[in-house]
Amino acid sequence: MDVFNDGPSVTGNAGIGAEFETFFFSFQNSACSLEDTFAAKRQTVQGRSGLNYLLSVDTGALELGGGKLNPEYVLDGRNINVGDGSAAAAGTAIRDDFMNWTPWAETPPNQITIENFPQCNPWTIVGLTPTTDKVGMFWAPQITAPMPLEALYSLMKENVQKTNTNPDTDPNRNILNGATSITTGQNIQLVTKDYFVSPSLNINPSTITDDILGFCTLVLSYAKAANLEQDPDVSPKHKIPFMPRTEFNTIYAQVRSKFEITLFDLQVFDIFNILACYKTDSNLQLSIDSDYCTGSLSNPVPGTKFAGLQYTYSGQGTPNPANPQTVNIKDWIQDIATGNSALDLFSAFDKNYDSSIGGLNQATEKMFSSQRAVPLFEFRDLKPVQTSGFPTFMSNVDATIQVLHQEFAAQPAMRVRVRRQSDGGSCALPSTTTGNPATPTTTGDPDCGNPGQTPCPTEPDCGPNLGQVPCPPGPGPDCGTNPGQTLCPTEPDCGPNLGQVPCPAPTPTPSPTTTGTGTLVTASATTIQLPGASATTCNDPEECDRLSNEARPSCQTAADCTAGCAQSLSNNTQALTVGFASTCVNQAFCTCSIEAAEIASEILIALGDVVCVVWNEAFQGAAAILAFVVPYLGEVAEGVDATELFEAANEVFKKGAKDCNLACPGHQYTAVDPKDLNSMLGINECGDDEPTDSPGT
């Protein structure tokens, strides 16, 4: 049987596949040709299998040559699940199987038969005798598991920082972090935010998230490795210790929306052509990679070499004409960006060897205790394990995957600002008001800042109000009581309007006070305890934005967000839930927002209409709240204006104002998502096609 069972899992949940190969004994057949020997890879040794494991054969990391194979235990990632104990159980099973195997006592002795492989049989066992120290024999492990790109990036970063350390003697190295290649050196091209400073990219580096950095690092590492010597019959998978088992088109889909937001008029390859200009050392210091570029760190000038790199198959076997014999790096990256093919060009090229890279095609698995689906990766060149250590190793791998999946549970939110344009007065505030409106701090036409326009008002990015993050000490707040500042509005936290929670029974409104632990914010009749300002200071607004965003967990799905908020509420009676865009603000002021790429734009489109609706319902302060919250919730490019958002809304929202008895003059649709109204948008005013008592306009 041909063994390729490291994944995906049968259930679609997070699985663990594993391989343990040893070089301390081998199987040999001098009559077997090189081509037939390669064909034997992953075949099963007769009589050596059990629950979730089997003993297979491999051609060896350095390609042993004709007639020589290494033993390799394979654990079935299709049926071993993260967190259920099956990984450690499989480790125990292969330990016991090997310890109980006495081939010298069998008839005929010291021979194996490869199942369903008539080309070459039998094979002689060389190096395994009654005196062999089987319990202390070392095996080289490889682990296959689902991993989000931002978690992969954290491992890649650690790998680069530990380039000069020995994983065999480093107790703090992550168990999934393999050793630097002893033959080619460190080949991970760690991409950092500083790679995006080039003015030709026109990208704000602070908006680049770790999942983008993980994808760019993976692609750039394999791309530049094409410049290294290419050994015959050796797959490019040996270049770095992190190998994607999911093909690259599917991996790119994880970050496609962010690239499309960021690219503007650039092609994906244009970005990588600039990224190739840099290299990062083990101290995470950048320098210009003179192999590919000239210029300076702030303004690199790409050459033509990077675009001309390619891999070429030069193996001794007969090539399959269905597989590309070469792959050009520029063609590969451009092909990934189009997403037109079922299999990216680099994964198709690797079929010339053993179909390891991208060999599981479009497979993804859900993360542990999550519905978020992520690609599968093989973690290679890991610290060797003794036979006696199989169970413990697999248990530790299981625990490590759980930790990484919990630490990186939600896809990073892309931090951008959305600037609103005037709607031509169609959302004018009526002359009568209800509730307890606050006067907004910004006046005039918000379409500002360009030649011939009025200066733009400063939006309060931090402060004590709903939708703001706590301000750091010193400069930072755009409103307040300090000289040169405007007065901050008091935002209504509750009320009858869209996006508000119900207000409690009226009580005397307390005066705002400040304590050493936080600020008491007064809004209507509700007092909410928020934390004090962070000790971290920042002077640059973009840096402040980046720091606040990094501290904010986000969710891939509404269910994740709801669960996170429920936990916060159960642990903290002072937590505040905002029934708006599935956002939860807890006492630590961590905002949990849905950031799934496929609904991020819908959320922002909805918020634009929500602002308009609330203004028309004569609750001016609520409109200000929603307006200031908008920049914190989305994956929308810098500079996208309201006109573009509302034009997109015509394609997204198919329900009219009449469905909820809400109207926004000048806009065709209200914030109604027919797919999943309550969980996706968090708007509780409207039911499923049921009118409410909310007044129309």
Image (cartoon, rainbow, N blue to C red):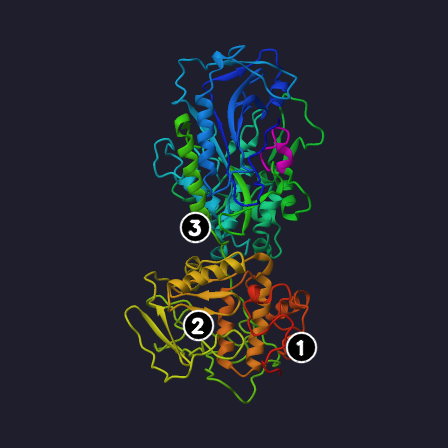
Q: Whole-percent x and y of residue 126? A: 49, 13
276 vs 662, left or right, is left
574 vs 16, left or right, is left
Say which residue label 1 marks.
Answer: 658
Distance from label 1 to label 2 (Cα)? 30 Å
The N terminus is located in which quarter? top right
Q: Please name the amino acid that badge 3 sits on.
A: Glu
Q: Please name the amino acid that badge 2 sits on.
A: Leu
Q: Earlier in the sequence, mark 1 or mark 3?
A: 3
Badge 2: few (under 14), some or many (20 or more) residues near its Cα, within 10 Å? Answer: many
Say which residue label 3 marks.
Answer: 407
Which corner quadrant of the image does residue 448 belong to? Answer: bottom right
Q: Which residues are magenta?
A: 346-358
Q: Earlier in the sequence, mark 2 or mark 3?
A: 3
Distance from label 1 to label 3 (Cα)? 43 Å
Say which residue label 2 marks.
Answer: 466
Which corner quadrant of the image does residue 85 belong to? Answer: top left
Q: Nearer the viewer, residue 50 or 643?
A: 50
Tell me the element at label 2.
loop
Looking at the image, residue 236 lies above or below residue 636: above
Q: Whole-percent x and y of residue 238? A: 52, 31
Q: Please name the amino acid that badge 1 sits on.
A: Lys
